[in-house]
């Protein structure tokens, strides 16, 4: 059943129909014309070419402004509820490409407050995770001079006046309609969307003039930014533009990699053995027996292993097509494909983990307003 899925900022279930979701949310498809336009600024990123970043709001305006010499500020974020996995890295990698391609400053918001409010975690837990997650973010090589990390409970003095302005314009009935809150929802959760809206207006506030803002993120965050965009004109700020990606798939065949399915989730700190084990158990499009697969071939369309190559681990289109073809012809079997993917992931993680260690020095300089990271409780 196509309708049988749910996507909210806090819950993703079912088989996501991304076209239908786009329709429900009212976002605009990234079409050929927009891709052509974007390719003028640099070689188009595979995630755009492959329709992983597939939907947007007001992307054209951002580019029009940019062409007139008006630089936008990038904004994205992370709710620090656990260790970083590959699904989190995917949109950050895209953000890094935008920063490099357009040479723009960026804010990264870590919503330790959100995860405290919505999950069974203490503020100490979420603060500690913020530091651990920030290392993964910084490891991707964002420009330390142009990138600031906001931790909500550390930077609340900056965020609060902006959040208040937003909160005054959002009624309880809007919050209920957009997020499905009811009378049992704690009041912090109801207020929270105002905190996530704040960084979209931060650069305008600091500069004292309207500065365009672009937010590349998962489409599950759209409810927050619908609200943000609705209130912006009334507050004298430009509506932020958005560019949305699909969820990074889980290894067990699900539509979203999630820490609730540990064995189908690859963390940035996983070692080679763990990766091999997890990829080994992945859901594939293979047949029950080798004989049958040699004869009938596999189905890359449904295969989690193939999706990993598609999303992150094979940037070369012709090599990707070759892989799909040889799978369909029954030439390459699941075992070999899994071995190749394991190798790719391990090479990537070895490099990432080294950079993650180096990032310990970098994140200090990225702390917005120079706050002290909570490293004390670090594991
Ligand atoms: N709410 C997001 C999460 O749970 C974190 C976040 C804050 C975010 N600001 C953002 C994500 C801006 C994308 C863009 O992960």
Image (cartoon, rainbow, N blue to C red):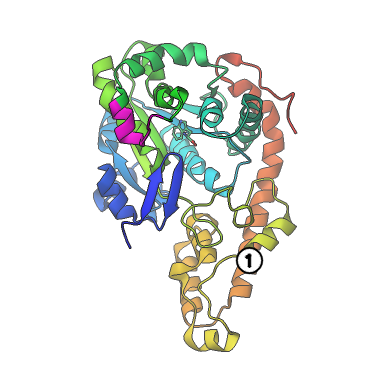
At 28% from the left and 22% from the top, the residue drawn is 231
Q: Dividing the picture into quarters, in which one does residue 50 lie? A: bottom left
Q: Position of residue 331 (x, y in %)?
A: 54, 82
Apparent side of residue 93 relative to residue 268 in the rendered image (left or right): left
What kind of element bears circle 1?
Answer: loop
- Camera-side residue: 274 or 11? 11
Q: Position of residue 75 (x, y in %)?
A: 43, 30
Q: Is residue 344 left or right of residue 357?
A: left
Residue 353 at x, y percent in the picture? 69, 43
In the image, the segment drawn in magenta is 173-183
Q: Is residue 240 visible?
A: no
Asked if the stretch drawn in magenta spans residue 142, the answer is no
Q: Is residue 254 visible?
A: yes
- Judged by its main secondary structure, the magenta piece is helix
Residue at 28%, 43% in the rendered image? 25
Q: Please state, as top left, top right, bottom left or bottom right, where the N terminus lies in the image.
A: bottom left
- Label 1 neighbourhood size at 10 Å, few (<14), some (14-19), many (20+)? few
Q: On screen, 229 above or below 163?
A: below
- Tag 1 residue: 281
Label 1 CB less than 8 angstroms from ligand 1: no
């Amino acid at each position: 059943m196509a309708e049988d899925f749910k996507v909210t900022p806090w819950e993703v279930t079912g088989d996501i129909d991304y076209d239908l979701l786009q329709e429900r949310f009212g976002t605009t498809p990234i079409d050929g014309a927009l891709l052509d336009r974007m390719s003028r600024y640099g070689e188009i990123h595979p995630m755009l070419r492959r329709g992983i970043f597939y939907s947007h709001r007001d992307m054209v305006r951002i580019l029009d402004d940019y062409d007139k010499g008006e630089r936008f500020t990038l904004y994205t974020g992370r709710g620090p509820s656990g260790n970083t996995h590959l699904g989190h890295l995917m949109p950050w990698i895209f953000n890094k490409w935008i920063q490099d391609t357009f040479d723009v400053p960026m804010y990264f918001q870590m919503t330790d407050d959100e995860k405290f409010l919505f999950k069974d975690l203490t503020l100490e837990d979420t603060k500690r995770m913020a530091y651990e997650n920030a290392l993964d973010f910084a490891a991707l090589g964002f420009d330390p001079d142009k990138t600031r990390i906001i931790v909500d409970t550390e930077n609340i003095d900056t965020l609060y006046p902006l959040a208040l302005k937003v909160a005054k314009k959002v009624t309880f009935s809007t919050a209920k309609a957009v997020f499905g809150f009811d009378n049992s929802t704690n009041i912090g959760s109801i207020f929270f969307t105002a905190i996530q809206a704040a960084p979209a207006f931060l650069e305008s506030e600091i500069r004292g003039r309207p500065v365009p803002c672009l937010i590349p993120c998962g489409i599950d965050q759209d409810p927050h930014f619908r609200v943000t965009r609705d209130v912006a004109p009334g507050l004298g700020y430009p509506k932020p533009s958005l560019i949305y990606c699909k969820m990074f798939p889980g290894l067990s065949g699900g539509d979203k990699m999630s820490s609730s399915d540990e064995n189908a989730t690859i963390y940035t700190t996983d070692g080679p053995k763990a990766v091999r084990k997890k990829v080994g158990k992945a859901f594939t499009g293979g047949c029950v027996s080798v004989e049958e697969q040699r004869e009938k071939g596999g189905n890359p369309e449904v295969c989690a292993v193939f999706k990993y190559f598609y999303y992150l681990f094979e940037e070369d289109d012709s090599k990707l097509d070759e892989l799909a073809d040889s799978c369909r012809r029954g030439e390459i079997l699941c075992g070999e494909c899994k071995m190749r993917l394991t190798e790719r992931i391990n090479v990537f993680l070895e490099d990432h983990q080294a950079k993650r260690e180096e990032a310990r020095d970098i994140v200090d300089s990225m702390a917005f307003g120079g706050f002290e990271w909570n490293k004390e409780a670090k594991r």
